[in-house]
Image: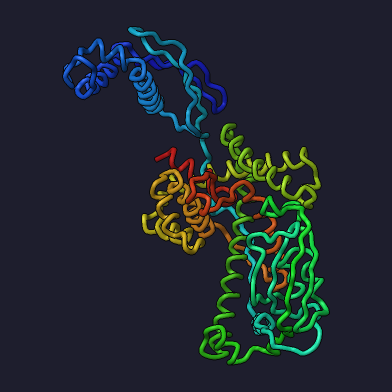
Amino acid sequence: MQVKQTKSENLKREYTIIVPAASVEKQRDAKLKEIGKTVKMPGFRPGKVPMDLVKKQHGTRVMGEVLEEAVKSSSSEAIAKEGLRPAHQPKMEVISFEDGKDLEYKMEIEVLPDVPEVKFQSYTVEKPVVEVEDAEIDKALKKLAEQSRHFHTKEGKSVKGDAVIIDFEGFVDDVAFDGGKAEGHQLELGSNSFIPGFEDQLIGVKAGDAVDVNVQFPKDYGSENLAGKDALFKVKVHEVQAPHAMEKADDHLAETLGFEDLTKLRDAVKAQIEKEVQETIHAYAKKDLFDKLDQEINFDLPETLVKQEFDSIWRRVEEGMKANPDAEEFAAGEKALKQEYQEMSKRRVKLGILLAEVGNREKIEISQEEIMQALIREASQYRGQEKQVFDFYRNNPKYMEALKGPLMEDKVVDFALNQVKITEKKMSMDALRTLGEAEAQQGKKATEGKKSSSKSKAKNTDDAKKTDTKKSTSKQKKSDD
């Protein structure tokens, strides 16, 4: 095999690779011989068909397979021989091949950049310090009490906020439609859980009333046969109910929520608030670290990875534009959005490569147990479909590999934050909450194009996963292994 470099420009490389005809023919003949052992042809016993006839009948197909295998194996050998670290799957183009002659093809590839060593000890990261006060716990308990409301039968007419117990049946063009009938249904007026206008027409009704409710299905309604159509619902009101909420948290509320008493509930609420506080603090420190790394460390980025990242994001943005064209996040216009997401793509790829390199240099590893725990967490989000999610990942190694990205990023970030200097900044819960909301909004953008449903994965649809740099981290780690 001959390997000749024909281009070296930044991270781009091109090679001409020649595989000797004898090597190709050897692989072809071996495959034909294997086929000849079982091939059937009129006038010959199985396994006794002359090789020239086997070649005539199967030669073209076999040669296609051989060429594909020859390109795959020789390109892998060339990559190893040249000491390349591919940033993506190389692009191949056959230059020439004829039976009995050498196979010549071109390989185009981008390599991963050389990444400077990061001295985390020289970085200073700001970390909020927040004390969870009793007032914050009291506020959360009060909210729980308010949310634990229930309904009691009342006399008289319904008002907004009440619930009604109703039977109903829907008709379009005087014909009842599937799914438009229910009995004994509790509907909270003002919940907007029914078709627009339905609940409003039940304000002012009382037990025993029969009401005709006229509505129009939204044009984007899920059932095409109903979308945009006028409908009549015949409604029978059995009961009007008024809401009742607990005035304060007490032992009874605790028991209804599965706790022994109010003290145990209070402890659980405090623990949950503290957990959320620590998650927000960690996210803030992580972003501060990422911002500093992005500003201070520079190296060439593989254009292919940046394009793949941007395309992934932009597909999701376009879906959002189609579904909700008037949304505030699209107000800047397509040109400005593309520029913003181009920069985001570069940041993701840069930080992904950087973190992966740190992980390699520091020999940070992910255990099989950690991967399994991540898979369990993923599957647990889809109750009733856990087995399908498990099966999907087990049958699709590339998605199982993708689970490692978030795990690797988290471990590298933890390593880095243990090395940097920490500047503590005292902060109130309200200030931290504002920070958390800002982080959540940024995270929404950062994950654009990354979102994927394990439900859809279980049905063999594809997409990638998770946050700011995790996909790229997984990619480089795999390339270096």
Can you give x and y, in whole percent of width and height, for residue 268 in the image?
Answer: 55, 81
Direction from residue 325 to residue 90 in the image, left or right: left
Can you give x and y, in whole percent of width and height, for residue 409 in the image?
Answer: 51, 52
- Residue at the image position 56 percent from the left and 50 percent from the top: 452
Instruction: Look at the image and name its color scheme.
Output: rainbow
Direction from residue 234 to residue 311 in the image, left or right: left
Above or below, comparing residue 293 to residue 373 in the picture:
above
Tell me, yes or no, if residue 118 can be seen here. no
- Residue at the image position 56 percent from the left and 83 percent from the top: 257
- Residue at the image position 71 percent from the left and 64 percent from the top: 170
What residue occupies the far front of the structure in this picture?
A: 174
Above or below, comparing residue 56 to residue 423 in the picture:
above
**Total labels drawn:** 0
Above or below, comparing residue 201 to residue 61 in the picture:
below
Quarter of the figure with the C terminus: top left
Can you give x and y, in whole percent of width and height, for residue 218 in the image?
Answer: 76, 56
Question: Of residues 241 and 382, which is closer to you in this image?
Answer: 241
Direction from residue 133 to residue 14 in the image, left or right: left
- Corner quadrant of residue 428: bottom right
Question: Of residues 106 and 286, which is closer to you in this image?
Answer: 106
- Residue at the image position 39 percent from the left and 23 percent from the top: 68
Question: Of residues 122 and 3, which is closer to you in this image?
Answer: 3
Above or below, comparing residue 302 to residue 37 in the picture:
below
What residue occupies the far right of the structure in this picture?
A: 204
Tell me, yes or no, if residue 410 can be seen here. yes
Can you give x and y, in whole percent of width and height, for residue 323 in the image?
Answer: 72, 49
Quarter of the figure with the N terminus: top left
